[in-house]
Amino acid sequence: MVHNHTFGQAEPRTGEARTRLVVILTALTMVVEIVAGLAFGSMALLADGLHMASHAAALGFAWLAYVLARRHANDPRLSFGSGKVNTLAGFTSAVILAVFALMMAGESLHRLFAPVAIAFDQAIVVAVLGLVVNGVSVLILQDRHRHGDGDGGDHHHEHEHHHDHNLRAAHLHVLADTLTSILAIVALLAARLLGAVWMDPAMGIVGGALVAIWAWNLARDTAAVLLDRQAPDRVTDEVRRALAQAGRIEVLDLHVWSIGPGVRAAIVSVSSPEPLRRRDIAELIPDDLGIAHLTIEVRETE
């Protein structure tokens, strides 16, 4: 019997459409800012437009990951389907976020000791525009299923195995930009109204630190999936309890790991003095654990 290893990855995910929408919104804002910057001679607008270009590229990468995962879902070279393309994209985004955080902190430290002239009015307009665009993007990309850290941690929550790391990465990208806009507005107003010019680089350092923390958490969770980390105790305990219902079954070995968003694989080795059919054991595993690929080894004991 030939097994299907697509595990639903060939179907478009909700995150794909939302990410594509944000890519278009970001790209349009980028064009407006660059054109306005060139037309009005505003370096602040031009600089933010170029920043938006890098932002659009990062989000475009997240959207491309959805497309590649869907198109290669039936690739026979991928043993457990293309689900981990999603997680790989999330890990790559975490690295990009970490670089972004270092750049923010580095530039802010430089400006703290070597202040530059700031065109406050133009800079505030740019920051407000960025806040509006990124705020809308955050709402679009909000992961409504997220209640914890997924398979990267041991948090107990109902939708644990449904988490989309790629969508989370895209959400963190726009969240980082939203945070940057908010901090920039606060710092610029403080500098313009109170003369506290040091607030601008100080807020940049704070923003860089927060983005670095987000990047670390995302990298930790995605790396756990890429390295086939054992599923949380809640999942393995439920499997053991389910198998215990079949009588005198001893679980000799159990491995449960994530192979994609909402999809897990499992290998279970059991022994019993009574004859057991693999099909009967498979039917004991709860459906809500998301185990789509199950390998069972039965050893009969005397």
Image (tube, rainbow, N blue to C red):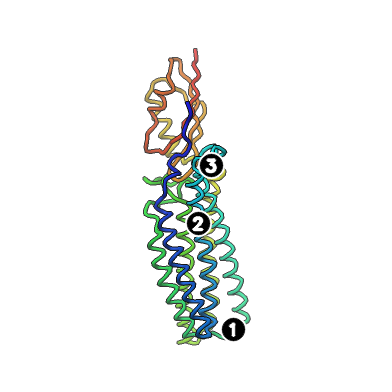
Packing grade of label 3 (10 A; few <14, some 14-19, many >=20) is some
Find the residue positioned furthest to the top: 302
SS at badge 3: loop
Q: Residue at x 43, y 54 (%)?
A: 16
State how far apart marks 2 and 3 are (Cα): 23 Å
Question: In the rendered image, which residue does mark 1 sit on?
Answer: 116
Packing grade of label 1 (10 A; few <14, some 14-19, many >=20) is few
The amino acid at mark 1 is Val
The amino acid at mark 3 is Arg
SS at badge 1: loop
Identify whether 266 is placed above or below 221.
above
Residue 169 in the image, given as x and y percentages of width and height? 49, 57
Choose between 66 and 146: the one closer to the eye.
Answer: 66
Residue 243 in the image, given as x and y percentages of width and height? 41, 27
Q: Residue at x 40, y 31 (%)?
A: 285
Question: In the rendered image, which residue does mark 3 sit on?
Answer: 229
Q: Are marks 2 and 3 in contact (CB under 8 Å)?
A: no
* Mark 2 vs mark 3: in front: 2
Packing grade of label 2 (10 A; few <14, some 14-19, many >=20) is many
Mark sitting earlier along the chain (2/1): 2
Q: Are marks 2 and 1 in contact (CB under 8 Å)?
A: no
Residue 59 in the image, given as x and y percentages of width and height? 49, 61
* Mark 2 vs mark 1: in front: 2
Which disc is residue 206 wearing? none
Identify whether 232 is placed above or below 30.
above
Question: In the rendered image, which residue does mark 2 sit on?
Answer: 62
The amino acid at mark 2 is Ala
State how far apart marks 3 and 1 are (Cα): 48 Å
